[in-house]
């Protein structure tokens, strides 16, 4: 197989920059949508044979297809039994129901940690006889460097409160989201907020308007968390809201330390506990003993929930987990990064090491956060195709393939490719940004033979369904092809420079 990959690399050295003639149905849709062939990168392979190659060695913006890189490397490096873990630890003593010392909440990239899980961990303390904590609550994020990537970072776009924009954290509860229930009559707007947090309330200066309830977001303005002089926090909603409308929406507006502190105080108080200390950032002492713990679901479940709905936060947590392991990944244990070395840098190195082990040249490859929610990430169709080939040979191929959306069935493809030859058969990860549309995965042809499929459109005109129409036509063409349609030979070499997309 390595000999075959070497042969394919030689072919790309000669033909990678060339543009094979596009299939007639694809070329027709491309012209109809007003897109240029220079804005398109394609590689379709059947085994080691090149079915179609068009600018396959050009570094392009992959959007969320980059999640395939993160999830494939995570499965191989972390293993299917890997789980994130949150711990409650202390080095204090318990005397007559009083914990005399600090309580440490130690984060371990637990993607599933919820308010209910925090309550259950605190309940375990209650079962151990602890009723009062005479110390501080210490938030330990030392597994990542820096522990809080969100601080000082400018927002990606104009919706920093939206879930897709949540920045990862090794100690993230409820993904830092507040669920807001909004119900209006003709004259009044009623608001409810979950979870309940200590001394946090919700208010609004929204104006009720005559508008379509289904288009309520048209009047939405950025909410804010207002801190009062007495320490209370009020979440304020702004903009307009339709009359006689009911909607639920989740927002990320609280500082995550505030979120954890207010949740902890509320849950401990609900259990009848007493706490008079502060909430501070720190680390667990070496001799701190375990009081309670929570583990996330296993990695294959997280990979599925990353790729099917294209979850940016989960992808970013997995990517950073690659930079948080000790040298023995089988141990499944985390270690604080070396002094001065960021977890992102270690994650980047882990991905590149995996690529080189699989004979994938990483020239031109740029990975910023592993989710594709980036304007700097780049990958060539060739690099992505070789990763997908490695996925077919991996011990975890079933887990990897089952994580991808199925055409016309589920995930981000549930409404796409309906009525095509790929419906119910192709497994493809989607990718969408303002100027990017991409698809990558596996497409069986008419003979049932698996094709590795990678296609990306990088264009300011890619939106409004234009780029999607081109890629869907290409998927359908591959799914209809078979023995009667021989693979297209690479075009003659052309002097076409390799250049990153602006």
Image: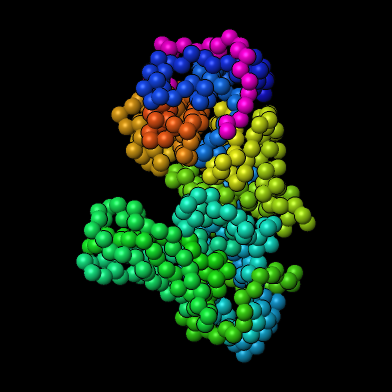
The residue drawn where x is 26% and y is 70% is 188
For residue 84, say whether it is visible: no
For residue 311, say whether it is visible: yes
The residue drawn where x is 63% and y is 23% is 498
Q: Is 111 or 465 nearer to us in this picture?
A: 465
Q: Is 11 or 442 nearer to us in this picture?
A: 11
Work out whether 236 lies above or below 498: below
Is residue 485 shown in magenta?
yes
Where residue 7 sits, quadrant-wise, is: top right
Query: How far across and down, in percent of the image, does residue 122 sit?
Result: 54, 75
Q: Is 293 or 409 nearer to us in this picture?
A: 409
Work out whether 90 lies above or below 493: below
Query: How far across and down, in percent of the image, does residue 309 sit?
Result: 44, 46
Q: Quadrant of the C terminus?
A: top right
Work out whether 499 lies above or below 178: above
Where residue 237 sits, quadrant-wise, is: bottom left
Q: Quadrant of the N terminus?
A: top right
In the rendered structure, which segment of residues is drawn in magenta?
Answer: 477-502
Is residue 70 shown in magenta?
no
**Magenta region, mostly helix, strand or loop?**
loop
């Amino acid at each position: 197989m390595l000999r075959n990959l070497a042969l394919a690399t030689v072919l790309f050295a000669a033909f990678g920059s060339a543009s094979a003639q596009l299939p007639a149905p694809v070329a027709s849709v491309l012209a109809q949508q007003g897109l240029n062939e220079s804005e398109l990168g394609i590689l379709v392979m059947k085994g080691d044979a090149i079915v179609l190659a068009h600018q396959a060695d050009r570094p392009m913006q992959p959007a969320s297809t980059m999640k395939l890189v993160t999830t494939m490397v995570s499965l191989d490096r972390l293993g299917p039994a890997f789980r994130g873990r949150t711990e409650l630890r202390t080095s204090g003593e318990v005397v007559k129901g009083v914990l005399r010392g600090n309580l440490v909440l130690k984060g371990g990239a637990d993607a599933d940690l919820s308010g209910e899980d925090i309550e259950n961990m605190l309940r375990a303390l209650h079962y151990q006889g602890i009723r009062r904590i005479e110390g501080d609550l210490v938030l330990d994020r030392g597994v990542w460097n820096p522990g809080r990537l969100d601080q000082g970072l400018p927002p990606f776009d104009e919706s920093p409160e939206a879930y897709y924009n949540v920045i990862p954290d090794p100690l993230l509860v409820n993904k830092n989201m507040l669920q807001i229930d909004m119900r209006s009559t003709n004259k009044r707007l009623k608001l409810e907020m979950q979870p309940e947090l200590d001394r946090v309330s919700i208010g609004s200066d929204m104006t009720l308007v005559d508008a379509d309830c289904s288009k309520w977001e048209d009047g939405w303005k950025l909410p804010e968390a207002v801190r009062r002089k007495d320490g209370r926090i009020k979440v304020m909603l702004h903009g307009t809201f339709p009359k006689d409308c009911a909607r639920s929406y989740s927002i990320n507006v609280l500082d995550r330390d505030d979120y954890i502190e207010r949740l902890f105080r509320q849950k401990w108080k609900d259990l009848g506990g007493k706490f008079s200390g502060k909430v501070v950032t720190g680390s667990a002492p070496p001799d701190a003993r375990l009081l309670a713990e929570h583990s996330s679901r296993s990695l294959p479940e997280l990979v599925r929930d990353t790729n099917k709905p294209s979850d940016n936060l989960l992808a970013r947590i997995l990517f950073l987990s690659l930079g948080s392991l000790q040298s023995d990944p089988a141990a499944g244990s985390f270690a604080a990064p070396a002094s001065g070395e960021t977890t992102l840098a270690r994650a980047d190195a882990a991905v590149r090491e995996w690529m080189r082990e699989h004979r994938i040249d990483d020239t031109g490859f740029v990975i910023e956060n592993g989710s594709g929610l980036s304007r700097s990430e780049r990958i060539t169709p060739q690099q992505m195709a070789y990763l997908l080939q490695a996925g077919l040979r991996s011990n975890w191929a079933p887990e990897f393939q089952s994580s991808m959306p199925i055409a016309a069935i589920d995930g981000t493809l549930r409404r796409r490719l309906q009525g095509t030859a790929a419906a119910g058969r192709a497994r493809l990860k989607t990718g969408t940004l303002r100027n990017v549309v991409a698809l990558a995965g596996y497409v069986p042809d008419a003979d049932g033979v698996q094709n590795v499929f990678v296609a990306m459109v990088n264009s300011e005109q890619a939106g409004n369904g234009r780029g999607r129409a081109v890629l869907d036509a290409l998927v359908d063409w591959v799914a209809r092809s078979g023995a009667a349609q021989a693979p297209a030979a690479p075009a003659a070499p052309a002097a076409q420079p390799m250049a990153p997309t602006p």
